[in-house]
């Protein structure tokens, strides 16, 4: 399955056995927990995304009878607030009212569920009143079978990431440095 990889590392969480086990294979990580199998990148290159896509497709082929209910393709971006003015999305209408009542604001989290074409996108924006905002994009797909999942893995992860970066720029004015 990984003919071009010389070293494979199996990592077990010793201090907290409830954490997932990890299998590091070249530029990707397979993370196994009780309810999920995640294919994660060690870097954000197009080659790594392609390898993730190949691995996910191969896993679907190898385990055709495993139960599955959803597939997610996730991208996270951390944006420096000193370089980008995001005050329009980081200030809620009740911020001043809360401060007037002696509440100290420590975090702001905005969650959105959106549809674009056939894609369901869960967007979480997190701000801890420090110098960065985290944008988490989750492309969520309900599936009933591994065959359904295989269709999802035919989507280009690189194209989804490029489209997400374009959306960050078009909506929030954040350039492709993310």
Image (cartoon, rainbow, N blue to C red):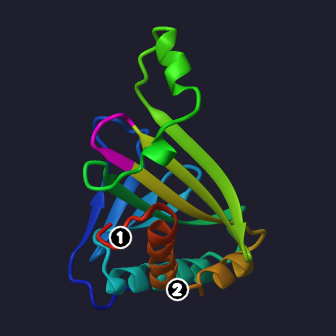
Characterize the magenta stretch by its predominant secondary structure: loop
Residue at 59%, 51% (x, y): give it. Answer: 35
Question: Alpha-carbon neighbours of circle 2 within 10 Å: few (<14), some, or many (≥20)?
Answer: some
Q: What range of the chain is rendered magenta?
A: 128-133
Q: Quadrant of the N terminus?
A: bottom left
Q: Check disc 1: other Cα within 10 Å, few if <14, some if 14-19, many if 20+.
A: some
> Which residue of the protein is positioned furthest toward the bottom in this rendering?
3
The residue that disc 2 covers is: 156
Image quadrant where residue 173 sits:
bottom left
Please state the horizontal and vertical placement of residue 68, each as a whole percent of the image.
70, 64
- Report which residue position mark 1 lands on: 175
**To which quarter of the image does residue 106 belong?**
top left
Q: Is disc 2 placed on a helix, strand or loop?
A: loop
**Position above or below: 147 against 36:** below
Position of 66 with respect to 89 (left or right) is right
Residue 156 pos. (x, y %): 52, 86
């Amino acid at each position: 399955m990984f003919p071009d990889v010389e070293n494979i590392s199996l990592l077990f969480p010793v201090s907290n056995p409830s954490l997932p086990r990890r299998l590091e294979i070249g530029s990707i990580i397979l993370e196994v927990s009780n309810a999920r199998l995640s294919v994660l990148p060690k870097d954000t290159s197009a080659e790594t995304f392609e390898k993730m896509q190949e691995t996910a497709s191969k896993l679907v082929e190898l385990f055709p009878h495993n139960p599955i209910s959803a597939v997610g393709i996730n991208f996270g971006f951390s944006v420096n607030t000193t370089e980008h003015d995001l005050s329009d999305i980081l200030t809620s209408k009740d911020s001043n009212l809360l401060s007037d009542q002696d509440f100290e604001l420590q975090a702001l989290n905005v969650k959105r569920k959106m549809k674009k074409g056939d894609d369901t996108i869960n967007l979480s924006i997190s701000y801890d009143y420090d110098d960065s905002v985290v944008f988490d994009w989750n492309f969520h797909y309900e599936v009933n079978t591994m065959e359904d999942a295989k269709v999802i893995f035919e989507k280009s992860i690189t194209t989804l990431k490029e489209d997400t970066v374009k959306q960050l720029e078009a909506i929030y004015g954040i350039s492709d440095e993310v």
